[in-house]
Image (spheres, coloured by chain):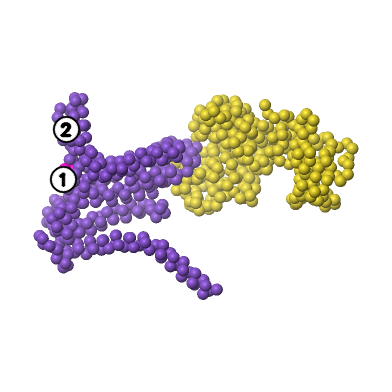
Chain colours: A purple, B yellow
Amino acid sequence: MSIARTLNDARSELVAWLQAGPMMLVFGLFFLLPLALVIIVSFWDYNEYEIIPRFSARGYTETFEGCLTELPNLCTILKTYLKTLKLCFLVWAITLTIGFTVAYFLAFHVRSTTWQIVLSLLCTIPFWTSNVIRMIAWIPLLGRNGLVNSGLQKAGVIDKPLEWLLFSEFAVVLALVHLFTFFMVVPIFNSMIRIDKRLIEAAYDAGATGWQTLRDIVIPLAKPGIVIGSIFVITIVMGDFITVGVMGGQQIASAGKIIEVRLNALHFPAAAANAVILLGFTFLIIASLSRLVDVRKEL
Amino acid sequence: MQARLELAGVSKFYGETCAVDALDLKIPAGTYCCLLGPSGCGKTSTLRMIAGHEATSRGDIILGSSNVTDLPPAKRGTAMMFQSYALFPHLSVLDNVAFALKMRGIDKAARHAKARDLLKLVHMEPYAERLPAQLSGGQQQRVALARALITEPQILLLDEPLSALDPFLRVKMRGELKRLQRELGITFIHVTHGQEEAMAVADLVVLMNGGRIEQQGTPREVFNRPRTAFVARFIGGHNVIARDDHEIAVRADRLSLHRGAAPREADALIATVSEVEYQGSFVQIALSSTAGDLVAQLPEADFDAAPFAVGEGVTAAWLPMAAHPLEGPHL
């Protein structure tokens, strides 16, 4: 009896390991291993043309060079991170506002499931083309002689083309918002659709106005979706360098861009060190967001 | 504080379908009223229109001396207890109960004190800090009740309040609803499809069918003088028997069974016993006859004195005074 039970336990344990196996393999091979390599390389030495596999903190020290001596002025790395954070905050705030509104509309105003599906699919249409094409599509629209500028000039609103429309922070934020709002919509919609409609009715019965219902019922219950969407957007924007490069006309520095520049210069240890710093930074933001809500409970 | 409710010609259309058809109903103040009927009879739509969660297509709802037809729920003096309770899952029991007061901008100390009073009323004070998910069904119902009562409504609307509970708890909670209604002295309007539940608690039973009121009255009136065959069948315990040009209702416990001929003064039908069910204090006997299926309820002792077996031929008889004539179907 007890032997049979032990055998049974051992078997179900084996089955459990086998079931988790493929995921563990992928996770280990494509995430943990490369991450370990990046951390190791970030502590190697380098010169103009080669990597020297020998312990050195040069990747880190050069990155933070002058940060103490230049005080109270900010050194390059801190300025860049501040800039990235500002971009990230703007994109987060705008995608959250738009994403929440769209999700709210889909979840509470669209009554039929069919229409909910149709409208959700409509949101995914931009994803049928590549990231780069969607970005480049803004150029004929926002350029010096683009649609917006020529339209405004013809309408007599402005005399000469607006310079800040393209290759500017505005353009970067616009493109990022365009690219990533959907990542906010999906998790927030997912949280909202699970809210029992009778709760909204119960709040109305208790005399709650629309705003009070939003503040006291909808937002607290949609919080998991808001946090998950925020994590998506923040991690993507913090590491972005393509959008910042193309839409900023290669004139705007960002945390991701530093890594790209270092890679192009073949300073792999320095690039790795910057990657580790960015990772740590992003991890801190995510960790503090995760404190707001138990994400595991929602998956 | 106390007010009577009047529905005058209230109708509800969903597109072309008519859910509630020109309903006229007066409910005196302090009444325990049950809206009873099969699903789709319009009882829930009626309740939701009284609550203000559904607009009336036509007609007026008058509470006391004011016409509340177009007022939002919170301005009517009604409060609703929802089916499956609709407690806010992210708020503690105390905050759930205090919710309506928070919406009115009442400060925390005052609204929590009031909420504690109501929790005491429903014997839920020890659970104030729990979340709804940590409560049993019966406990959730008490909290929902306290939440609805905190605004001191003139009328409490209960949408199938007992349907989520197991049978034992259902009997216990309906007793408590009745006690609470008596203590508070306000009107309760309780929607249910269970006739037993309605008979147990109601002062006024309103039996609905197809968007209209089929019959209203005290439980005794409705049970003893069903107006139509529908009422007699829905309320249970009756046999509907076709006689020449009309139908009559005979209570199952007024039917007597005989092996030979029936007593001379009684009406009778020849029937065959198709099922015998022991029900405790009485025995229920299903019969099939040329006039349709019948049910007789015999006291246990009478049955034991002369038991009937399945397949046996009997004469089912009733005294003329036990036969209650029914009106034709509602026109």
List x then y, in percent, for residue A161: 16, 31
Q: Which numbered disc, 2 or 1, marks the residue closer to the eye?
A: 2
Report the number of numbered marks.
2
Q: Earlier in the sequence, mark 2 or mark 1?
A: 2
Quarter of the rendering containing residue B78: top right
Which residue is the extreme one toward the bottom?
Answer: A3
- Say which residue appears at 37% left-offset and 46% top-offset: A187
Residue occupying the point 16% across, 32% down: A145
Magenta stretch, main secondary structure, is loop
Looking at numbered disc 2 in the image, what kind of residue is underneath it?
A: Asn
Image quadrant in which you'd find residue A52: bottom left
Instruction: Provide the residue span drawn in magenta.
Output: A248-252
Is the C-beta separation of discs 2 and 1 under 8 Å?
Answer: no
Quarter of the image for the C terminus of chain B: give it: top right
Q: Marks 2 and 1, how far apart in space?
A: 20 Å
| Residue at image mark 1 | A250
Element type at mark 2: loop
Q: Amino acid at mark 1?
A: Gln
- Tell me the subunit letter for badge 1: A
Q: Residues within 10 Å of mark 2 (few under 14, many from 20)?
A: some
Q: Find disc 2 in the rendering and name its residue.
A: A145
